Image: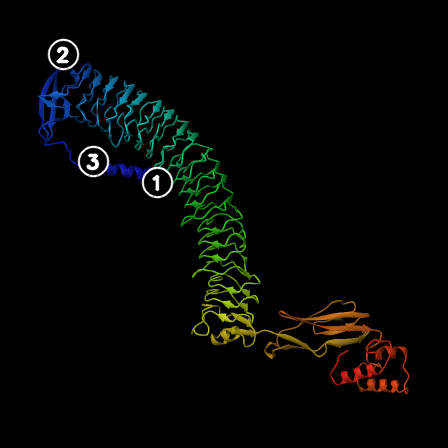
Amino acid sequence: MKKIKSLLFILIAILLIISIPNSIKADDTKYTTSSVINGRTIQWEYQLNDSNEIINLKCLNSVALYGDITIPSTLDGKTVRSIGNNGFVESSFLTGVTIPDTIKEIDYSAFKDCKFLTRVDLGRIEKLSFDVFKGCDSLTSIEIPNTLKESALSEVFTNCTNLKHITFEEGLTKIPQYLCATTGIEEVVIPDSVKEIDYRAFKDCKSLSRVDLGNLETISFDVFMGCDSLQSIVIPNTLVNGSDYPIFTDCINLTNITFEEGTTVLAANICATTGISHITIPNTVVKIEREAFDGCKKLVSITIPESVKDIEYKAFYNCTLLSNVDLGRIEKLSFDIFKGCDSLESIEIPNTLKESASSEVFTNCTNLKHITFEEGLTKIPQYLCATTGIEEIVIPDSVKEIGYCAFKDCKSLSNVNLGKIETISFDVFKGCSSLESIVIPKTLKNTPSSEIFTNCTNLKDMTFEEGITKIPKYICTSTGVEEIIIPNSATQIEYSAFKNCSKLKKITIPKSVTKMGFYPSDSTDTVFNNHSSDLTIYCYKDSVAHKYAVKYNINYVILPEDITFNKSVFNLKLGDILRILASILPDEAADFKITWESSDPTIVSVDEEGNITANGNGEVQIIATVENIVKQVVVFVREYRLGDLNDDGFTNITDSTLILKYLKGIENFTEEQIKAGDLNFDGTINITDYTMYIKYLKGMEEF
């Protein structure tokens, strides 16, 4: 795609050049004249510009040119300013040429196929067009004068594979596009005066193996495209302006790139599509620009020094073997930085990170299964972990906020610990199809005005931590939750908290909740918008939740608030069977079923209807539970039945009469009767015991 874009750019530029008339050309009139060079008469054709100077000079009998020549600087008393296209084409006997200082421009194919041309002096040339020296097979060296400002939109020395030495005069400030492309140069030394190299200046120089970039500041795209012999290079610390496209395009043999100490910026596309496997970034670098390592398919590890604060988009795009990344103390990450890094399996996010892009950072890194967050991090920025293969998240307690789409489309994410977050944005877990359960921490206070768990239809279990005071808006919207229990600490349920929860069948709301959505002012339900017809609110009589359900015609069930018993203390004799009579309050909750449990079934067992059996001597608690109500009674088992003096299974007026007779000396008791009648366990039967009998019979006391 990048190559297509660059080709389109070049084609458009060529069309623009063709459409613009020659600025120095006055008219189309052609003139002829002659001069003598090396004893031979040479016929010339030319045109004139507005200054009456010769332009588009052409030789009409190029076969007459012989040996080493100097092109005339004047003809017919007029100064020669430019050589026209094909001006000396196929001058088969030309071996050397000197361009006079007056000539500033050479048009395309001017010396094309001058097969024996071995020497060229470019004088003070300013502009070279394409194919000027195409096919000059004998040309082995040339110097580029510092006056050169412009070259063509394609090669100048096209396929001059024997041109192995090109030098640049000190004072040159820019190497124009395509200038040295497809030549046979083996070494390039850029003068310190050169600040910029334009696109494809050294494209397809297959023998180029050594490059000294001098004090270069700006480099364009495809400058060293296809330079297969280039294996190492030093990037000067002056280079701060990179390219929109790769610079060393497809230089897969370029395996050693060194950044000069003092470098502050790794320029855009500076290492893109090279063959590097490791890289050392100086600790003076503060920024890695866009696509700096794009397409480095052999890069396996990268350590970002602590000095780097900002990494721009696609910096490591398609580094398919990159498996080890240390982010240092980074503060800002842009989008698609690690897109296509298929070998990346784990990474730690430093606590210095403050900002990420408005789209994915680790785009489609489905093998990235482990992302950890350094303690001290306060915010997980938007999109940070989106579309990765992470399976589990543990948010450090230091994190207070999660930005939007932070974990969007993490299809394998199944376990999330939200730590102590306070603020969460929209679509944070959108599309996390493997997420089935989550605990909402009591610290959460702020949620967005749209979904958080968007389309998490497999999220069926959401638990609110005890201590939470507000169930935030949109917290559960569009999930697959089926049952919710609101903790007793909650006092408010915000609007749309359970919007579009089509699978929600049961929600339990305590008395502590005194505010729900916009109730009672709103005419429609604002908490359970678009709820299932099967939704039932479990609530307490006359609570806000009860009134809410009534007003908005939602199914409801009144919850139990208490369990009462016919007695709180039971005294049994070994082998006794007795039913505990229990009632659920309020009456509207009577349909709930009590579950029974004995603290020691070997002493007293209890069945599901509350029938107890005395199995052994001792004391037990019989526990009755309904919903979240737990009450208990005490049961004593002895060899005798306390208070039952006649062993008829009851404590009544007959027993109190027997005690009175005993106290008057009318009746004698056995040892077992004395134990049964000693209600205060002081070892004797006295007036105190009789008084306790009377109070018991009047319902004033239990024993």
For the residue pair 203 and 26, the one nearer the viewer reads as 26
- Residue 388, compared with residue 555, is above or below; it is above
Left or right of residue 328: residue 160:
left
Residue sitting at 75 percent across and 79 percent down?
A: 702
Q: CA distance from mark 3 to mark 1?
A: 25 Å
Q: Out of 277 and 633, give the one closest to the viewer.
A: 633
Note whether 481 is above or below 52 in the view shown: below
Residue 443 falls left or right of residue 693 = left
Q: Which residue is mark 2?
A: 39
The kind of residue on which mark 3 rests is Ile
> In 3D space, how far apart are the residues under numbered discs 3 and 2 (Cα atoms)?
39 Å
Dividing the picture into quadrants, the one containing residue 184 is: top left
Cα distance, mark 1 to mark 2? 56 Å
Q: Find residue 518 and report its horizontal and vertical position in percent.
A: 45, 71
Count neighbours of disc 2 (C-alpha within 10 A) and say few if under 14, some if 14 to 19, many if 20 or more: few
Local packing at callout 1 (Cα closer than 10 Å; few below 14, some 14-19, many 20+) is: few
Q: Nearer the viewer, mark 3 or mark 1?
A: 3
- Residue 329: percent from the left, percent from the top? 48, 42
What percent of the width, then of the height, locates residue 92?
21, 17
Q: Quadrant of residue 122?
A: top left
- Quarter the N terminus occupies: top left
The residue to which callout 3 is attached is: 17
Q: Are marks 1 and 2 in contact (CB under 8 Å)?
A: no
Provide the secondary structure element on which disc 2 rests.
loop
Q: Which residue is mark 1?
A: 1
- Residue sitting at 48 percent across and 70 percent down? 516
Q: Answer few, some or many: residues within 10 Å of disc 3's Cα (few below 14, many 20 plus, some between 14 and 19).
A: few
Dot placed on the residue nearer the N-terminal end, 3 or 2: 3
Q: Earlier in the sequence, mark 3 or mark 1?
A: 1
| In front of the other: 87 or 547 | 547
| Nearer mark to the viewer, of 1 and 2 | 2
